Amino acid sequence: MTTEIKGRFGRFGGQFVPETLMTALQELDEAYDAVKLDESFQEELRYYLKNYVGRETPLYFAERLTKECGGAKIYLKREDLNHTGAHKINNALGQALLAKRMGKKKIVAETGAGQHGVATATACALLNLECIVYMGAEDVKRQALNVFRMELLGTKVVAVDKGSATLKDAVNEALRHWVTNIEDTHYILGSAMGPHPFPTIVRDFQRVIGDETRAQVLEAENRLPDAVVACIGGGSNSIGMFYPFIQDKDVALHGVEAAGKGIETGKHAAAINRGQTGVLHGAFMYLLQDENGFVQEAHSISAGLDYPGVGPEHCHLHDIGRATYGNVTDEEALEGLKLLCRTEGILPALESAHAVHYAAKLAKTMSPDDILVICLSGRGDKDVHTISEALGGDLR
Amino acid sequence: MSQLKDAVLSATSQGSKAFIPYIMAGDGGLEKLKPIILKLQQLGVTAIEIGIPFTDPVADGPTIERAGERALANGTTLRKVIETLTGFADELTVPLVAMTYLNPILAYGVEQFAADAKAAGIRGLIIPDMPLEESAIVHPALSKERISLVQLVSLTSTPERMERLTKASEGFIYAVTVNGITGARSSFANELQEHFKRIQSYTDTPVLAGFGISTPDHVKDFGSFCSGVIVGSKIVESIVNEDWATIEDLIGASKVTPVK
């Protein structure tokens, strides 16, 4: 419903890329339209999602968390239990299969936290594709474990020390690499952002989260949830969770942006809450920028949310009031992380911890008859060094 | 009629070729912008492409990207570049072509930008992250101020696309000579000549070659099958090194040597 003109979500989206990429985007668009309707492709994807990724993931009733919050019944959609530990594999695998169909032998990808990089490296190992991943030098430091995992999987990881040396700079380099190697390379973009058709492709490969959740909630409770909550960097786990519920007007959709050190400090990644419209990485979207149109650095304890823009479909859902976008600081996310560890024995990724904190607060305002689902997009093993440092510990 | 197109056509009328150097505004400080532009003008260039630095220059190679970083570190912004140019616009005898990513224009305000750019002597505009399909966002405002919106044609553009791009391009057609980003290169594919012929077959708007042209031989080679060249990285590098001899040689290669 949100796509009126192809590639547009209301006034957002588009294809703001160098001319050299236009033919490739056109080809990708056509190839994707074809596989979307191709039962053999969908069959192959389902096969790998079930037998390799381990879907479907559980929808788990978090009883102790629910009691602790004292409000709505809280369910966790366990994307952290996917192979490679996050939802990113849903899209990476889908796009790698698509690249094979398109006859591309090489893959380039960007990564922030390293989850998308690991997922892409994994899919490429599985499908015998050559893979190169660009990662901000700052993130390489923060996520050394994921760098090592990618290298074990046979992927070349290139540290990007330009600009803020984080996700946005990794996207710049991945785009440059793609422009230069357009003939044999497919770009597996990791979030629901970038030029058309990427926001649509990523959403479609991630909607399995929301489709499963919808069916699982109906089975467990015989009705739809009152609210779903997911964290937002570029917005892939959240759009995957939201999309199948968009028509269900009684299901409140809550996206949680990273407020970093606090919205008022200016050191945050809250593009929808504090950005202005602009163009970056191929799309018209809400963007953190200064009065000269220069893109500002985002700040978040979580590398996966550390991005100054946000996917165009979320911008549109915000504009039309269909989804609500809140925010959670670094400190609050750590509280959410500790809360989930303590009550449920689950260590969430720092990204997902933002959703946990927000949902815990939201649940308190709801009645015990209400149902709330948190998208637990990834597990926190990758973050233990960051967490330990933030909590004043020393893990060496 | 486009003032930019007139300048390119008149540069090519005597058998010589058009030569457009690219400079990064604010590299070395904005106070250098005026002397560099006036010097290039005096050396007989056809037009001057002025790069506006941006935080995320995805179409630029390392040389221009670093120049942009230096310019940003100097506090260069689109607004300051336009103010500086406006200060000596009456001394300009060649048209200026601004090359800027889209977002600074959106932040400036499209209409205000077009009006101010015209007053600054800007007669053409290249927006590397805005393909033809998205150009409605700026085109009406530019047309009103008679600023030519130059389209890039790449090696990957399909023939059908190429035709649309060449017909839409104003001032000249910027034919990208390699797949990739800006920057000096040693060799070019042989099929290029065919590619240029095809582009020119759709239009009488002059076709200029750009990306990777770095030696007087490149200038001559491309000049033999199109209307001229745009030289970026090599000029930027030479200006940093204050190596005006290299710049003069490059410009010289675009001119017909007078017969004795």
Image: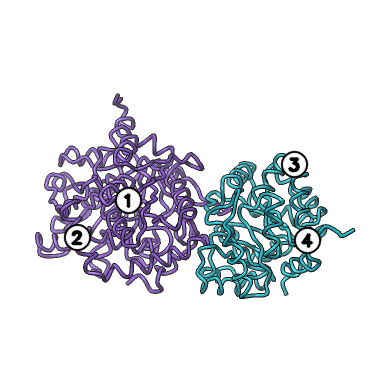
Chain colours: A purple, B cyan
The residue that disc 1 covers is A129
| Vertical arrangement, residue B28 with respect to residue B91, above or below | above
User: Identity of the amino acid at label 2?
Assistant: Arg
Where, quadrant-wise, is the C terminus of chain B in this rendering?
bottom right
Element at label 1:
loop
Query: Where residue A100 sits: x, y (%)?
Result: 31, 58
Q: Amino acid at mark 1?
A: Leu
- Quarter holding the N terminus of chain B is bottom right
Residue on which disc 2 sits: A46
Callout 3 amino acid: Asp
Q: Name the residue beneath numbered marker 4.
A: B94
Question: Gap between marks 3 and 4, in whole Å?
Answer: 22 Å
Residue closer to the observer: B161 or A271: B161
Mark 3 against mark 4, which lies toward the viewer? 3
Chain at tag 1: A
Q: CA distance from mark 1 to mark 4?
A: 51 Å
The amino acid on which the numbered mark 4 sits, given as a three-letter code, is Val
Could one spot residue A73 in this view of the protein?
no
- Asked if one can make out residue B72 in the rendered structure from this viewpoint, the answer is yes
The reply to whether callout 2 and callout 4 are in contact (CB within 8 Å) is no
Give the chain of mark 4: B
